[in-house]
Image (cartoon, grey):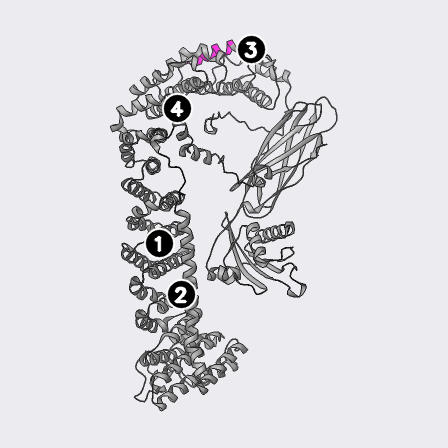
Amino acid sequence: MTAAENVCYTLINVPMDSEPPSEISLKNDLEKGDVKLKTEALKKVIIMILNGEKLPGLLMTIIRFVLPLQDHTIKKLLLVFWEIVPKTTPDGRLLQEMILVCDAYRKDLQHPNEFIRGSTLRFLCKLKEAELLEPLMPAIRACLEHRHSYVRRNAVLAIYTIYRNFEHLIPDAPELIHDFLVNEKDASCKRNAFMMLIHADQDRALDYLSTCIDQVQTFGDILQLVIVELIYKVCHANPSERARFIRCIYNLLQSSSPAVKYEAAGTLVTLSSAPTAIKAAAQCYIDLIIKESDNNVKLIVLDRLIELKEHPSHERVLQDLVMDILRVLTTPDLEVRKKTLQLALDLVSSRNVEELVIVLKKEVIKTNNVTEHEDTDKYRQLLVRTLHSCSVRFPDMAANVIPVLMEFLSDNNEAAAADVLEFVREAIQRFDNLRPLIVEKMLEVFHAIKSVKIYRGALWILGEYCSTKEDIQSVMTEVRRSLGEIPIVESEIKKEAGELKPEEEVTVGPAQKLVTEMGTYATQSALSSSRPAKKEEDRPPLRGFLLDGDFFVAASLATTLTKIALRYVSLVQEKKRQNSFIAEAMLLMATILHLGKSSLPKKPITDDDVDRISLCLKVLSECSPLMNDIFNKECRQSLSQMLSAKLEEEKLSQKKESEKRNVTVQPDDPISFMQLTAKNEMSSKEDQFQLSLLAAMGNTQRKEAADPLASKLNKVTQLTGFSDPVYAEAYVHVNQYDIVLDVLVVNQTSDTLQNCTLELATLGDLKLVEKPSPLTLAPHDFANIKANVKVASTENGIIFGNIVYDVSGAASDRNCVVLSDIHIDIMDYIQPASCTDAEFRQMWAEFEWENKVTVNTNIIDLNEYLQHILKSTNMKCLTPEKALSGYCGFMAANLYARSIFGEDALANVSIEKPIHLGPDAPVTGHIRIRAKSQGMALSLGDKINLSQKKTSL
């Protein structure tokens, strides 16, 4: 019997606070009490029998005084009682009293109340005694004709289970149910009958389906789901039947029920790999994502689409549906949008890239007009990155994308602006033809940039790529405009002293041609005194940054001024104009140095920035060819090398991905022909319906690794000693957010242990879901107790407890055996993940918990140690292989992982090989772990400490 078909018995919670009542008091209540008292007594009897008590003396009392009652609650309780009570003598023969019970149930099956009939039929599904069922068969058959659908559908289920367990009792069941199905009108009854035929007599089910295949669309969704399952199973077992039923599956894609559409699309993909079938299924999935409101459903169906894409022959079909997939972006959920954009990016080709870019541009513009929502910024970042990737892969698109994106450099959200800047930097380096356009747009938005970090990047780009006289002069104009009146110190002191009246306050005028014929700058023309009064806060951006004490931007400005001045000198031959431009640049640097040394800024200038500005002044005063080369050529070469290394790495990862997807067939591999495959071989293929049911029940049969240590036995923890009266061991099964403890308890004594209870408590972010029920253990008997624990976050949890029991007949107090602690391994929740360098640095700065672990190992190779740490912590190395290759005696690498609860874990490995101690000296150094929660940081540190000590050479 498969796991899906196991009988589910009625489980009843046991209250632990009360003493078990005596058999005499129960007998008295059952005989003489009123209905309420009898109900309570019957409940107590059921609980005691579940706990292992036999109570044989009460059987006849219940038959005489409780069975004849017509109260519905008592009738329901009696069904539970007859299910659990022992019905046979020790030698396996049926008890005589059960004949009376059988008669009572025959009467209940003819009861005028449909609830009593229906619940009795449900109870009969759980009976395993053929002798009890035999006299009831005529009454069960008669229930198929009942006027109420509740009775009829339970009668079908009862006939199905009886036919499956005792075929001789009703050998004509399939024929009977087939006739019933033909005449039945109620959807739930038809569904139960059809399901029985699928499992009992598939040919009859197919015959029925053939007669009504054109009406399938008019059936209820519960029946349609069963029909999909039948078609899947038939075509799975007998591929020649596909042509007969595939049209029916196509029709079910148009069903009104989302569940039917989902199952039909999944079945269609497994039955046919024709482009039309794949397109129909994908279209159905996309409709489901758009129409369903639940984000979890959207994510699950998106995963199905991504699975489709993994198949090389299906990818081409999905490429034509990229525009439909982009309709999903209307969903406000960020995770759904993220997956959608990634899928669209994977499917984009030269045929549809133009349409994709148009949609993405519209989306980017939309985010600009939306009232700020916490996810809007992140969504904008996603869109920018997607457009970035499109432009790199399809350079023709860059010209369309750049003007739109550059508007966002002045955005308040620094992260989105930083992504745009990174994209612009790559585009300006890669695409020479776009440089004039980018420089022009950059000069337009330069004054509006609000973030100092973006300002620095923009300065660098302008300094590096302005190559004409006009552009260089425009950059200088923009810098002067952004700096305000100079000298800065004097104008600020005047402003404070109030010498400049607010009406006449000098403010920066709009950008205009401020260069004379000689190439010099007219200082007074860069400023105007006709503007109305402004607040102090409205000072020009660069001046604002400097007065706030951010002088790193001044160092960046000095480098930019040096580059453009050196380039201007090489472009303009006239000495006077050369000197005038250099003097202008040196004046700006000198006034910034003066400001830095004064007391006006909030923070004084740092020595590093002073050195940088001084160096730039020295370079401009000397103008040596060597410095010209360093500033104007080598900077760009460094960027070029970095971008090409990045591109190479991306290509390598894409190549690995495509290699994974390509199914490699060896020359000597046998070819399997579907038509020639034996039926029993066909059935060995995985049944999707069975697999999904097992997955839902948490019984996924994972393929065990070849390593025997990776087997289940590795997860068994011994809880008590072999000489303890009760031996216990637990198998710890981690299933995402749940931990199931399967505890084996063995009575090693010659006494009967009563009320043997497993008492558990947890430490950490673990929560015991329910208290395990007490057991009665016979001498040298054993039993399995299951306990569920919920996990709320990633940290090392400990489960501890004891087993308490009473010895039968002993007058002493309860006995107790203390259990060893069970440590929950956090590695079950941690998965490797990747993030960009910028995100890593941001998280590193934000996370407050740090755990510094000293390297203590016997591994002597740096790379080997890093691989060992990656393997034992499930983390991913973010540092590219190129950066780690070669040998220089030390190594630094960034690691990142994410838990299934969405918690991030960062680590920085800094290790070295102490050469002075000889070639066999072990690796030394530190690993710094950072996380948002203390538990995560400590748990990972403990894991690293444990794993590095265990390593053997």
Q: CA distance from mark 4 to mark 2?
A: 61 Å
Location of residue 24 in the rendering, given as x and y in whole percent from the top left corner: 64, 15
Q: CA distance from mark 2 to mark 3?
A: 83 Å
Q: Could you classify mark 2 by the number of other residues whose Cα lies within 10 Å: few (under 14), some (14-19), or many (20 or more)? A: some
626 vs 791: above or below: below
Location of residue 240 in the rendering, given as x and y in whole percent from the top left corner: 31, 30
Say if mark 4 contacts mark 3, CB within 8 Å.
no
Mark 1 — residue? 345
Please report whichever mark, 1 or 2, sits nearer to the chain's N-terminal start.
1
Query: At 36% from the left edge and 71% from the top edge, which residue is drawn?
Result: 448
Amino acid type at mark 2: Glu
Mark 3 — residue? 95
Q: State whether the magenta stretch is mostly helix, strand or loop.
A: helix
Location of residue 555 in the rendering, given as x and y in whole percent from the top left corner: 47, 77
Magenta span covers which residues? Answer: 99-112
Q: CA distance from mark 1 to mark 2?
A: 19 Å
Q: CA distance from mark 1 to mark 3?
A: 71 Å
Amino acid type at mark 4: His
Say if mark 1 contacts mark 4, CB within 8 Å.
no
Please report whichever mark, 4 or 2, sits nearer to the chain's N-terminal start.
4
Query: At 43% from the left edge and 55% from the top edge, which residue is drawn?
Result: 653
Which residue sits furthest front? Answer: 668
Q: Quadrant of residue 671?
A: top left
Q: Is residue 781 magenta?
A: no
Mark drawn on residue 422? 2
